[in-house]
Image (cartoon, helix red, strand yellow):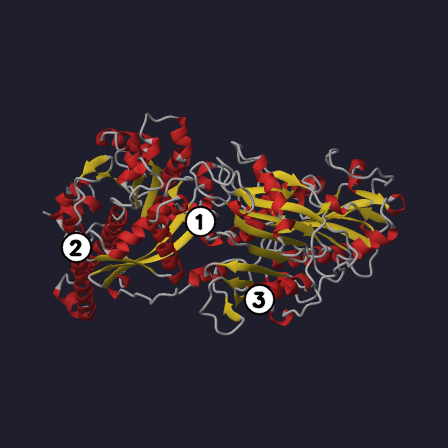
Amino acid sequence: MFSLMERGFKSMISSDSISILGYSCRSLPGSFDEWCLIPKNHKSIGSRTELRNLLVTRLQSYRILGIEYPHRGIWMPPHKNIILVEMACLATSILQNQSLPLTEQKLDKILVYLAYVTSSDLDFNTSCLHSSTLFDEACKDLITAWTSEPSDKLFYSTPIKENASIFFRSKEKSKLTKEDTSKKLSSINPEATSMPQNTPTTKDSINSQDSNLDETSQNRWAPIVYGRTYNEDYRILAMPADSNENEIWIKSFLVASCRYPEKLRNSERWLLVKTKKFCIVGVSCKADYISKDNILDSSNRPITVFLGYISQHPFPQIPNRDINNFKDLYKIIKDRWESQIKSDRFVSEYKEMDFSYPDLNTTSIDQYLNFNEEQVNIWKDNETRRQLLWVAASKTRKPTSLCLGLAQRKDIERGPFINATLAGSTAITKEPETIFITNPSDDSEDSESYDNTEYSNSPNYSDEQGNFFTRGLKALLFGEEER
Amino acid sequence: MLGGSAAGKTCYMIAMYKVMNFGIELEGFLLKSSNIDDNARFAELWKLLRSKGPNRWPASTVGETNTYKFDFFYSNQHVVSFDWFDYRGGALEDYENAHDLKALRERLLETSCLLVCVSGEYLAEDLDLDAYEKTYVSGINQLITDTQSICEKNVPPAVVIVVTKSDLCHTCPEDELIEKVKTMFAPLFAEEARWLVMVCPVTLGEGLSSDLLKGEIRPVNVHLPIVFSLYAELMRQGWIIAKSRKQYLEELERASEGFLAALFKRKFITERERDIDILDGQIRHIEDHVRRISRRINMKDKVHVFFDGKRIQINDFFR
């Protein structure tokens, strides 16, 4: 059941106004062993066939994004007066430690789509989208379906219990103005397939379709800090709760911005990442650059930190590359300096911030900013380039990523950023230098390929032992009988 | 390479690379990085290391893993290329819950040699809980046990327990040091476990224990783990080739039985004889390298090698 600890709104919603839709199948939609969950009163939404097709389509949309990590979103189908609050994931994500009599099936090959559907007369509390208990009831229904064995694999979902309405409320009771609500829902872009939580390698995350920046959005940011403390190793020390699902993805950018820390002495490395859903901005530097104390770990080594902020769509204006906008965040590390545990993360909250901002009217080189995740644009690192790129990335509405001042080419080629300046880059003659990303496993490497044919022609082998090695090799390799 | 935070992995890599890049003590063996950036970084960090003062020590490494590619040469001839996977230990610290533990296990199965870094500061005194926690012994042993069960009949990777900062435990008698290591990593020294293990103390300089900022940088033994890894890998390759040769010999014998059989399979027999000649050449090549390593690198008095839990002498194999 939904946790009453979650903040929400009191509601006068009837128990059957919010329904569950669910769908699961083997790795491809439409394959056998699919289960459909639809509400008994589905006729107001569509026929059984229409709903089944809708479910398949929605799952397929998320599947393209890659559902190794769960995705959540809100979708308003065109020409229908309904809202879907949806989730797509692998079965392993929702089963956790539960066991099922599905021993013959590989749970990491079963795809799951779940959604609450209601009329758009209701308002969904979007801040609850990432609540850990939001989809509990829907999951229970799907698990019930899996453990049953009807012939047609079509189930009617149970009506939502009343306390599920914590996450919804009728619009006339809403504390938001109608204008705010409509802005919030319209910003989701009903023509889009989803509000994906993308990985950097997902092509769809670099959709050239502009996101709808709300020019009047509040300037709300939550701190995000990566570093280490005196005793405990590097970790994320501050992040808002609604970013937890994307932790691995976010961490990849923070770690990449801190590589080769020796080159960060007395300098700053700036990071700006935009997706359709959120934006991260911040700076990596040595701790002694911004603080006089709490700067050496227990082995007397200088520490490196990332200090930044994260904001949700619609994005506020991007702050200037001014260390004063960020250095106060070091207090989060100082507060945990003596910590003996790693699970001491500060769950930050979104707040109004008062930053300094760049002048966006300066000429930008937006036309050189790369938005294609299959390539990287590299520039020489100097202050002029940094400012131009920062302004361009600040202004653009397209998803992209930028790191200013990376130290090694390989950190760019193998890292998550698709735009970067390379410190000490005398080799770049044409700007930007564009390189195409290869699969690391296909990397033929910078060096010559040493093909020692004497070793490369080894044929297949049997389990028998050889009998012509030196006594020592035989004894070592072939067992006691040879010794 | 595995090891907990502050085990000395970065410093070990820098010193190892520079020593082997210069060819010191190796008489013809050389190591080169395949990547220009890595080469430049090692050079810069080595320069800092040789300087004196608080800036000499590299910053703590950020991120879970780092990967490097190296090429090993002998007498200007390329012997082997290998990947160096530097894993910092997050999954080892929390063995049951690490999300990348599966990747680490799979990586281990493809590994020729595993370097486990243990700081000598934890071996100077009696072993205590702090020593076990800070060196991630529990996680490493679990990983070893898992690898053992997966390997089954195959030979598990060779292991070098690199006792870093050995200047901090120089007062500990050698035998006592070995016993402590064997206690900590008991699964590696179990009978019939088929682990080939070398225990190798290394240091950046004997004087560092008394003066961290100004002590002289004079690396000791830093090349031995890599040379041993090469030895182990050559042995493994030789084993694979020897098995193939045996198989081919048997096929040849079966094909040659009887006059008519030999007549009709003349082409196959000729091909097999040629294959066996090629394999013989490969084996001689490997044995040649292995003899050079064992003859020119005198490991006898410096390190300890174990197989199936029993101490062995590498030189003994090439009388």
In the rendered image, residues at marks 1 and 2 fall on the same chain:
yes
| Residue type, numbered disc 2 | Glu
Answer above or below: position of A239 versus A457: above
Q: Residue at x 81, y 37 (%)?
A: A162
In the rendered image, residue A200, in percent from the top left (x then y), is placed at 57, 58
In the rendered image, residues at marks 3 and 1 fall on the same chain:
no
Answer above or below: position of B262 versus B287: below
| Residue type, numbered disc 3 | Arg
Of the pair A371 and A353, the residue shown nearer to us: A353
| Circle 1: element type | strand
Q: Residues within 10 Å of mark 2 (few under 14, many from 20)?
A: some
Q: Disc 3 marks which residue?
A: A385
Left or right side of A292 for A84: right
Answer above or below: position of B30 versus A345: below
Left or right side of A224 for B256: left
Chain of residue at mark 1: B
Q: Disc 2 marks which residue?
A: B287
Q: Residue at x 81, y 53 (%)?
A: A82
> How many numbered circles does the render carry?
3
Task: State the CA–CA distance, disc 1 to disc 2.
Answer: 34 Å
Q: Residues within 10 Å of mark 3 (few under 14, many from 20)?
A: some
Q: Disc 1 marks which residue?
A: B65
Chain of residue at mark 3: A
> Visible in this render: residue B95?
no
Q: In the rendered image, which quarter is residue A382 located in?
A: bottom right
Task: State the CA–CA distance, disc 3 to disc 1.
Answer: 31 Å
Q: Residue at x 59, y 67 (%)?
A: A370
Answer above or below: position of A169 versus A433: above
In the rendered image, residue A99, in percent from the top left (x then y), is placed at 57, 37
| Residue type, numbered disc 1 | Thr
